[in-house]
Amino acid sequence: MIQRRASKNPHAEAEQFRRRALLGFVVVALCLIGLGGWYFKLQVIDHAEYATRSEANRIKPRPVVPGRGAIYDRKGRLLAENVPAFRLDVTPDKAGEPQQLLAQLGQVIALDPEDVERFEATRKATRGFRPITLKLRVSEEEMARFAVDRWRFPGVELVPYLTRRYPYGDLFAHTIGYVGRIDEKDLETLGEGNAALTHIGKTGLERYYDEALRGKVGYEKVETNVEGRALRVVGRVPAQAGTDLQLSIDLDLQKAMVAAFGENEGSAIAVDPRTGEILAMVSLPSYDPNLFVNGISSKDFKALNENPSRPQFNRLVLGGVAPGSTLKPLIALAGLDSGLRRPEDKVLSTGMFYLPGTRRGWGDSHRGGHGWTDLRKSIAQSVNTYYYRLALDMGIERFDDYMTRYGYGQPTGIDLTGEIVGILPSPAFKMKQRKERWYPGDTVNISIGQGDWKVTPLQLVRGIAGIADGQLRQPHLVRQTRVGFQDAWAPVVPKPATPISPNPAHVQVVREGMMGTMQPGGTGFAMARGAPYLMAGKTGTAQVASRRGTAAVNPKSLPMHLRHRALFVGFAPAEAPTIAVAVAVEGGGYGGSTAAPIARKILDAYLLGTMPEAEPLEGAGGVIEDVDGGGAVAPTPGATGAPSAAPATMPAATSAAPAAPTATPPARERTP
């Protein structure tokens, strides 16, 4: 039986099609709306984010390190400069296996084991996409060899940069200091924005003014291809060049100061008492700061550290010595200002001084005594008895108060880091250090600069410059600064000066006593003989080992570490001072025979323009021995120091040092 096929219903099928078409249209419309919304989000809402991502794939930021500020002397001569150099940078992610790379690269460029060790340590602590410096100084011959084989070393680049150079080497090592390579600790201090820097100031002015000298890092926007190679620079935020410094130091006087010491060790400083500007300052022996710029070798570092003369030790700001008789002018001024003494008041010096009820005494520099002594004579002939009695009359509290006013026991504020405050002896200090109370004999000891005293050459010269000018000023090294490419120099204004005494007449009496030191009968007359200008000064001898009773001590017979420290402070011309000096010679014997002649050479170089011969000057005849504290007192604590070794020969100066007008350093160009 044949089944009949159902007839079609055109109307029903048409209705079904319409429903399906409508549903498909709605679905397509919804998809189009969703796609449009997604495109809107990408193109409008998230445009900034994706544009940045796209740009980052094509544009790479590259830091631009500024040129470090230059340092000039007062006449415009470069003391610290930047010179072009090339370093070898390695990007670990692109360079391949490190050991194989170093082995192959070592056949082209000489790699020091210390450089390799430093590279390995940095590589392990740094992300692989960041370049790491493998060698800081690449010679021209090495650059030529590398250029031939460069294709063999992907991820290894020669990068131009500016490196620091100190043209005068050890002449300014303790003043200017040096820069060194940045380590992880430095990066933490500097912050992420300075990660591109390779060097930072480590010592001296380089450290104190580091933030100003290094400037501010800029960057370039560099377009790169898919392989990461630079195509062109599309934008730049310029780096801010470092600040230039012009110092108050005179290069010629600095050379003369070193030559004046000859083979002696010690320190010296010269200032302009009218301004507080430091004219020259040396700590001897010294060292070459260029050794540290790009990493000192183990051999050189070991040689410096094992040198018993400690060439790296800055005696100017870190070295403390007993001041000896160089304190007497200031103690005399304190006696006048306190009302305890008048200039004409006299004390009898018999050669020995005894406290009531004691049998042990303190001696004078003349074993037979100086007779009746007023203030002027006490300074000129360095009469200890005058100061023994004055300090006892003042009492330790008032004594310390005046010494604090003159700047002892506190930093001078010089623009160098690490300055020590020294030691101003006091009952509190003695109790803290030795758990002992203060005795009158302690007051006697400190009245002539012995005992627990410890002062720096900076404190000595500040005090004596205060007597020369009547004002206590802050010693400073930088006269003016210049920022970036600007031609105008801005003067550096130090702290305001303070009067050293409320009575200028008292200061003048002390000056007259110091002038008497340089006249016949004074402890410094042999040094002043023949000078065409009038000078004022005070010799000093800080004993390390005391003499017994009236027995003389020949310092030449003692081992170096027990020899007296020779000291001298003074200024010239006495009637209108333009320079004040302080000299401390380690193991020098007596101030009048060793330190004073060195000071004379420095003064002659500045005032007359004569360069001293680079030879040690032996003691001159006719000098009154200026030995402090010659009584039957045990060796004074605080007066000893580290043993000194055989003196190191300093290079002789070769040019004259005439006093010339101050020059302004010329404008300079910098290569970022």
Image (cartoon, grey):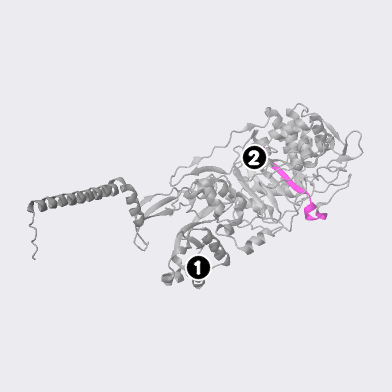
Q: Residues within 10 Å of mark 2 (few under 14, many from 20)?
A: many
Are the residues at dot 2 and dot 1 in contact (C-beta closer than 8 Å)?
no
Quadrant where the image shows the C terminus: bottom left
Per the rendered image, the range of residues in magenta is: 556-574
Residue under the image location 72 percent in, 57 percent down: 308
Q: Position of residue 630 (x, y in %)?
A: 84, 43
Give the quarter of the image for residue 574.
top right
Choose between 121 and 118: the one closer to the eye: 121
Which element type, helix, strand or loop, lies under badge 2?
Answer: loop
Residue 15: tell me if it is visible: yes
Amino acid found under the numbered disc labelled 1:
Pro
Q: Residues within 10 Å of mark 1 (few under 14, many from 20)?
A: some
Which tag, 2 or 1, sits closer to the chain's start? 1
Residue annotated with mark 2: 412
Choose between 250 and 491: the one closer to the eye: 491
Q: Position of residue 242 (x, y in %)?
A: 48, 48
On the picture, is 17 further left or further right than 171? left
Q: Is residue 567 magenta?
A: yes
The numbered mark at residue 98 is 1
On the picture, is 282 further left or further right than 481? right
Circle 2 or circle 1, nearest the eye: 1
Choose between 32 and 608: the one closer to the eye: 32
Furthest toward the top, the residue is 339
Amino acid found under the numbered disc labelled 2:
Thr
Residue 519: tell me if it is visible: no
On the picture, is 434 further left or further right than 59? right
Q: Position of residue 316 (x, y in %)?
A: 66, 47
Choose between 248 and 129: the one closer to the eye: 129
- Residue 454 vs 68, above or below: the answer is above
Mark 2 → mark 1, Cα distance in angstroms = 52 Å
Q: Is residue 452 magenta?
A: no
Residue under the image location 63 percent in, 38 percent down: 273
